[in-house]
Image (cartoon, grey):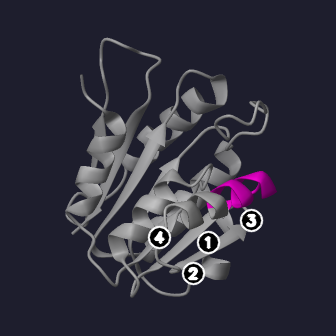
Amino acid sequence: MIDLLELQKYFIMQHIKEGDTVVDFTMGNGNDTAFLSSAVGASGKVFAFDIQEDALKSTEARLKAMNTPENYTLICASHHLVKDYVKEPIKAGMFNLGYLPGSGRKNITTMRETTMPAVIAALELLSDDGILMVAIYPGHEEGDLEGKMLADYFATLERKKVCASMFKIVNSPTSPYFYIIEKK
């Protein structure tokens, strides 16, 4: 069976190297933050965003337990404010839209009103040969609507500058899927 998380990592690793600047737009429990931290190494920079203090605490504990390089900045703010914190081009960005896994608070979720400006800002910050991974969780209403909104938006991007792709398991309509946005 296909492991979507491993596929995301595979695609990202084709674009990043040690020393790069990357962003985890939806920190959650820190899995992507830890992956990115290790991937860009001690000379790289990782910025990670979440609106929940629990996410920062969980992520910080994970990063310390995994002995990742101390190349990260954990930010308790919405991802749509990325440009207030990140002032340099980024090589990669990861979004895992939805709610904080394991929190029991499914009512606190990413929302279209902040996801769209966050994705637009990510594209503006993205350097040449950079990549954005946007994971969609259509099993809840807001996730389904975010996915449709982003599909409409990504379809408008100029093909000569950006390649927008989607990876989806077609015989499982409520399974997560992801968009791959690569800047030429």
Could you tell me the amino acid type at mark 2? Val
Q: Say what amino acid the circle numbered 1 marks.
A: Val
Are the two marked residues, 1 and 4, in contact with CB atoms closer than 8 angstroms? Answer: no
Mark pair 1, 4: CA separation: 23 Å
The label nearer to you, 1 versus 4, is 4
The residue located at (31%, 11%) in the rendering is: 171
CA–CA distance in space, label 4 to label 2? 21 Å
Residue 62 placement, left or right of 94: right
What residue does disc 3 label? 77
The answer to the question of whether label 1 and label 3 lie on touching residues, with beta carbons closer than 8 A, is: no
Compared with residue 175, is residue 132 higher up or lower down, i.e. above or below? below
Q: Earlier in the sequence, mark 3 or mark 2?
A: 3
Specify the quadrant that holds the C terminus.
bottom left
Residue topped by disc 2: 86
Residue type beneath disc 4: Thr
Q: Is the C-beta separation of discs 1 and 2 under 8 Å?
A: yes
Look at mark 1 in the image and give the residue it sits on. Answer: 82
What residue do we see at 41% from left, 15% from top? Answer: 173
Q: In the picture, which quadrant includes the N terminus?
A: top left
The span picked out in magenta is 50-59
Q: Residues within 10 Å of mark 2 (few under 14, many from 20)?
A: some
Identify whether 142 is placed above or below 12: above
Q: Which secondary structure lies at badge 1?
A: helix
- Mark before the other along the chain sequence, 3 or 4: 4
Say what amino acid the circle numbered 3 marks. Ala
Q: Main secondary structure of the magenta part?
A: helix
Q: Where does the image place residue 68, in percent across and percent down from the top left? A: 47, 70
